[in-house]
Image (cartoon, grey):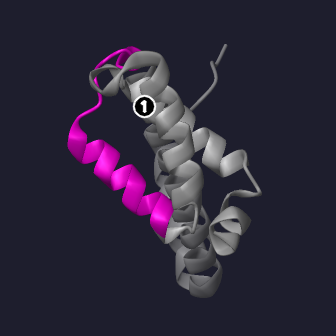
Amino acid sequence: MRGQGFTDSREKKNMIETIKIFVGNHPFLTLLMSCAAFSLALYFRGKVKAIEMAEYLVEHQDDLAPESLLEEAAQDASDRGKLKAFNQLLDKVIADHGRDGITMGHVCWIAQELDSDKRGSKQNRKG
C-alpha cells in the first residue's frame, strides 16, 4: 500500500521535469503567477505587521507618551487639517489626567477620534 506524496524518486524527477517544461513554455504565465504570489505575500506581511502593532499598543497603552509622540501626532493632525480638533481632544485628556498623565492609549484614542470625526477638517477651515 502506497501512502500520499512522492514515494519514489522517479515521480519526483517527473514532477520537476513537468515544472521545467511549464516554465519554459509559458514564461508570461509564470511571471504572472510569481507576481500574484509576491502580491499575496506583501498583503499578508502587512496584515501581520498591523497585528503586531496592535499587540504592542495594547501592551503599552498605559505607558506615558513621550513628548516627541505628541509633537508627531500634532504635526499629523495639522497636515490633515484637524489641528483644532486635535487640540480640543488633547485639552480634554489634560483636564482629566494632567499634562504628565498622557499615555500611549490617550494618543491612540485621539487618533481614532480624528479618523472617525468627519467635522475635524471643516472646523479648522471655519476657524
- Give how far across and how far down residue 22 sits, in percent: 60, 73
Q: Main secondary structure of the magenta part?
A: helix
Q: Nearer the viewer, residue 35 or 12?
A: 35
Q: Amino acid at mark 1?
A: Glu
Q: Is residue 56 visible?
A: yes
Verify whether residue 56 appears in magenta: no
Q: In the picture provided, is 94 more to the left or to the right than 30? A: left
Specify whether residue 71 is painted magenta.
yes
Task: Tell me what residue is drawn at x 55 percent, y 32 percent.
Answer: 109
Give the side of residue 33 with respect to residue 77, left or right: right
Q: Which residue is mark 1?
A: 52
Q: Tell me where residue 101 sits by quadrant.
A: top left
Judge left or right: residue 22 versus residue 41. Answer: right
Front-lying residue, 19 or 92: 92
Provide residue 12's location: percent of width, then percent of height: 48, 46
Q: From what the image shows, is residue 32 above or below residue 63?
A: below
Question: Residue at image x 48%, y 70%?
Answer: 79
Question: Compared to 66, does 88 lie above or below?
Answer: below
Whether residue 14 is visible here, answered yes or no, is no
Residue drawn at point x = 50 percent, y = 57 percent: 42
Rendered location of residue 125, percent (x, y):
66, 74
Pick the quarter of the image with the C terminus. Answer: bottom right
Q: Residue 1, position in %: x, y?
A: 67, 13
Which residue appears at 55% of the width and 39% of the height? 89
Count of labels in the image: 1
Magenta-drawn segment: 59-78
- In front of the other: 52 or 2: 52
Which secondary structure lies at badge 1?
helix
